[in-house]
Image (cartoon, helix red, strand yellow):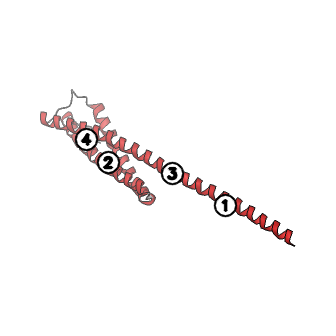
């Protein structure tokens, strides 16, 4: 990226903030879809969604790093905005990004908890099935020995 002049830097920041907002909106939609897939137990679709989500996360990291570099080079005092309105609108979108980022993180936490509960429920079912099979095998084994003992006595 070419070093921006202060005027250009303000415009570049606005463009990056808009891009960040679009990525966060996509991540929010992915999070909602992720919840539905977890509830439905659709592991194949969930894995596909997580792969797509990962590319958005990487894009978000890239945008955030670029924003960080710009903000490091140009503090608030050196940025020249096209108008006070541009500055106010950019600030408003930054605030929206921050709120949306918190919402995305909250949704991700909810998805993790939901997936853990689903996993624990499945583990309990597997354990219950395993215990049932194990007790069924012992019962069958005891019944077989009883029949063999009866066979021996009748001979």
**Which residue matches tag 4?**
17
Question: Residues under labels 2 and 4: Cα distance?
Answer: 16 Å
Considering only vertical position in the picture, is 83 above or below 29?
above
**Which residue matches tag 2?**
28
Q: Earlier in the sequence, mark 4 or mark 1?
A: 4
Front position among marks 4 and 3? 3
Which of 142 and 29 lies nearest the eye of the viewer?
A: 142
Locate the C terminus and report the quarter of the image it occupies: bottom right
Q: Residues within 10 Å of mark 3 (few under 14, many from 20)?
A: few
Image point 78% across, 67% down: which residue? 147
Residue 136: image tag: 1
Considering only vertical position in the picture, is 107 above or below 153?
above
Q: Residues within 10 Å of mark 4 (few under 14, many from 20)?
A: many
**Which residue matches tag 3?**
121
Question: Residues under labels 4 and 3: Cα distance?
Answer: 41 Å
Front position among marks 4 and 1? 1
Q: Position of residue 145 (x, y in %)?
A: 78, 64
Labelled pair 4, 3 in contact (Cβ < 8 Å): no
Question: Residues under labels 4 and 1: Cα distance?
Answer: 62 Å
Q: Outermost residue, top direction?
A: 77
């Amino acid at each position: 990226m070419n070093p921006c002049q202060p005027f250009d830097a303000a415009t570049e920041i606005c463009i990056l903030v808009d891009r960040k907002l679009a990525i966060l909106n996509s991540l929010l939609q992915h999070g909602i879809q992720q919840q539905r897939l977890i509830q439905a137990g659709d592991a194949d679709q969930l894995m596909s969604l997580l792969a797509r989500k990962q590319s958005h996360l990487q894009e978000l990291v890239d945008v955030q790093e670029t924003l960080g570099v710009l903000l490091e080079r140009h503090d608030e005092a050196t940025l020249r905005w096209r108008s006070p309105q541009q500055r106010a609108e950019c600030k408003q979108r930054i605030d929206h990004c921050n709120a949306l980022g918190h919402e995305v993180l909250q949704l991700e936490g909810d998805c993790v908890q939901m997936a853990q509960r689903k996993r624990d429920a499945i583990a309990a079912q597997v354990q219950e099935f395993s215990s049932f099979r194990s007790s069924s095998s012992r019962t069958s084994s005891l019944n077989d020995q009883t029949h063999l003992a009866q066979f021996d006595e009748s001979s």
